[in-house]
Structures are given as C-alpha cells and as structure tokens.
Image: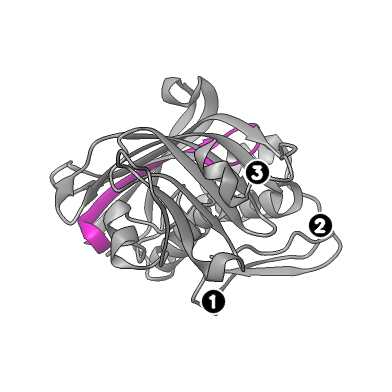
Amino acid sequence: MRRTFAYLLICLPLCLLLVPNSVPVALSISGSSEKLYCDDGGSLPSDEVFARLACENPVEMLRQSLKKYDREIKGYCGLMKKHERIKGKEQSSELIDFCFREEPYSVLMKWRQGARGAKASLYVCGQNNNKVAVVTNTKLAVTWDIDPEGRFAADAGRYSIREFSLRQGTERMLRAWQAAKDRGALTVEYLGKLPVVELDGRVCYILKRTCNPPEDDGIAAVEVAIDAENWLQLGSTLTDVHGQLVGQYQICALKINPEYDVKQFERSALKK
C-alpha cells in the first residue's frame, strides 16, 4: 500500500497555513482527524535540547521539528534522489529537480534520471481541477492532465504528488512512531550526529527504528536523517525483513524559502 505507512520525504496532506507563533496550531495527517501536536506559541528548544531529544525522546523530537517547520518554512527547492520497490518490483533510481511551496501547495518536478511515464509534472492545489499536469516521457513530449491518485500516478511512486512535502514525510513518521509508542512497541536506536555524504555532507541526527512485527509494505526497519541545522528530515531508507529496499529518499542541494518567479508554478514551466 502506497501511503498508509508513514515515513518520508518526500513524499506529502494538503498544506497547512503558516501562522504567527502566538496562535495555537493543531496539525494532523491528511485524511485523519487525529491531532499530532498543538503549537502553544512557546519557544522552540535549543539545539542542545533538540540533540538530547534525539537520544531520549525521538517522538518529541519529531513534534519540535514540525513546529520549527510550521513557523519558518514557506517553500524549498533542490534535488531528490529516489529509489523504490513498487508492487514487488525494484525500480530504477531517480534524480528529480523539484520546487515546492506551501501556499498554495505547489510541486514542480523534472526528472534528470530514471523517468518512467512522465519526465515532468506540476501540481497546484485548487488549480487545473486539482489534476496533475505531466509531460510524457516520449519523443512527442505531450502534456496532459491526470488524477493525482489514479492508476498512472500510483505506478509512478509509493506516494502521490499531493504527499510530496518534507512536512508530510515527518508527519507520517510521527504518526507511526506515536502509535507504536502508545502500544508499547516503539524501538528506536540513536546512531549519532554525523555528516552524511549523500546529503551534501550535511550533519544529521541519524535514528533507526525497528518494526516488530513489520508494518505496511512489510517494512521492518527505517533509518532517518534529520538535519542538525534546520531540523528537516532530509533522508529516509526503508527495508523489509530480508534487508531488501522498500524505499529510499534523499534531499540534496536544498535551498530554503527561495524567491520564486511569478511563473514558477505555471504550466509553461513544465517544458523550460
């Protein structure tokens, strides 16, 4: 199942509005009324306290990461490295240039490597009848509109384009880890604060969760990398009981809150 297990990235409820720090905010997973946390407007923890949470209370660490995101992040762009197993078949590795903004929720993706049905895609919440505009990976490079939850989209990845944001990846993980904690089954090992070569050498908190019994898609372990500077989840690797890859997502060349051109998320940007 593509979206029931909660981890990434990259991959992403409809956006929540950014609000002033003084206003309480309740966040929840798309399609669920379950509240993940309430931002009471208080100060964020220091980097030292956040590092301690990585060791002692990873669930609270995720909550604080989301609070920081909600207060500070309006959008970002970069390069996604994606490698998945879909319907039991390992897919080719993908390299995707992307641009994202929170309001209105907008995603533009262009494949450098590993493109299958589409070589570019664009989704803007509330526009184009909420369809995804895609440029086909063919000689004619036709642009057409598809259902973001339809069969074509399902064959393209474990998560739909409407589940793309880093926020949603962390929300999915928090929901899963909190549920495991509530039933007394959360096992998380803190592996340290380390530079990650695959993430441009950024220093990250590395945590590994073991799932016993395995969760959806047969996932038995998930290793995540949370950037020590901005507290964003930049990497996750999911494996099954045999150690086989289920999904790997890594964000590189990250630029936070870029100034986008007014036409950045228009249909014409697909073929630029």
Inspect the image, locate mark 1, and give the three-letter code of the amino acid beneath it: Glu
Q: Position of residue 162 (x, y in %)?
A: 49, 60
Sequence-earlier tag: 2 or 3 = 2
* Residue 261 located left or right of residue 151: right
Which badge, 1 or 3, comes first in the chain's sequence?
A: 1
Tell me the quarter of the picture where residue 27 sits.
bottom right
Residue segment shown in magenta: 213-233
Identified by mark 2, the residue type is Gly
What number is the disc on residue 42?
2
Dot 2: what SS?
loop
Q: Residue at x 57, y 51 (%)?
A: 267
Judging by the rendered image, the residue that carries numbered circle 3 is 264
The residue indicated by pointer 1 is 34
- Residue located at (60% from left, 54% from top): 106
* In the image, residue 216 lies in the stretch drawn in magenta: yes
Determine whether 270 is above or below 174 in the image. above
Crowdedness near tag 1: few (<14), some (14–19) or many (≥20) residues, C-alpha within 10 Å: few
- Judged by depth in the image, the label closer to the viewer, 1 or 3, is 3
In the rendered structure, are the residues bearing label 2 and label 1 in contact, judged by CB atoms less than 8 Å apart?
no
